[in-house]
Image (spheres, rainbow, N blue to C red):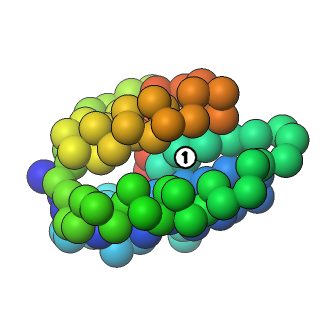
Amino acid sequence: MYSTKINIKKIGRSFTVDLSSTNPPLPTSKKNPHMTLLFSRGIYPNGILQRLQTLASQKGTISFTLEQWGRRSDLVKGELYDFFQEVKKEFPKLISDRKPHVELR
């Protein structure tokens, strides 16, 4: 079981949840562990970062678990998965088309 405060970051064309400060630390050697929330090949609507930060601020510290999924990634479960689903309802056309996961290996 892991816990973290939801911290939204933009990485390239994605908005992500930063997972570098989870408690306990994630078992990874990756420099920037994160879960992708939104991905767009085009331009994001105005105010999207603020809306994501507002949704995140309503959550406080959340808990989640990981389930092995493939060679390099684990699926995200628990409250972090629930947050992903909330974002999916808010921005259905921009949501990452993959299952919520984090690359660890």
> Identity of the amino acid at label 1?
Thr
Is 47 left, or right, of 37 in this rendering?
right
**Residue nearest the viewer, comparing 17 with 31:** 17
Give percent across and percent down for residue 22: 28, 68
**Residue 104 visible:** yes
Give percent across and percent down for residue 62: 20, 58
Give percent across and percent down for residue 12: 76, 58
Identify whether 45 is placed above or below 73: below
User: Residue at position x 38%, y 38% from top?
Assistant: 86
Q: In which quarter of the view is residue 63 placed?
A: bottom left
User: Residue at position x 23%, y 67% from top?
Assistant: 60
Give percent across and percent down for residue 8: 50, 64
User: Residue at position x 75%, y 49% from top?
Assistant: 45
Identify whether 41 is placed above or below 26: above
Is 22 left, or right, of 3 in this rendering?
right
Question: What residue would you read off at disc 1?
Answer: 36
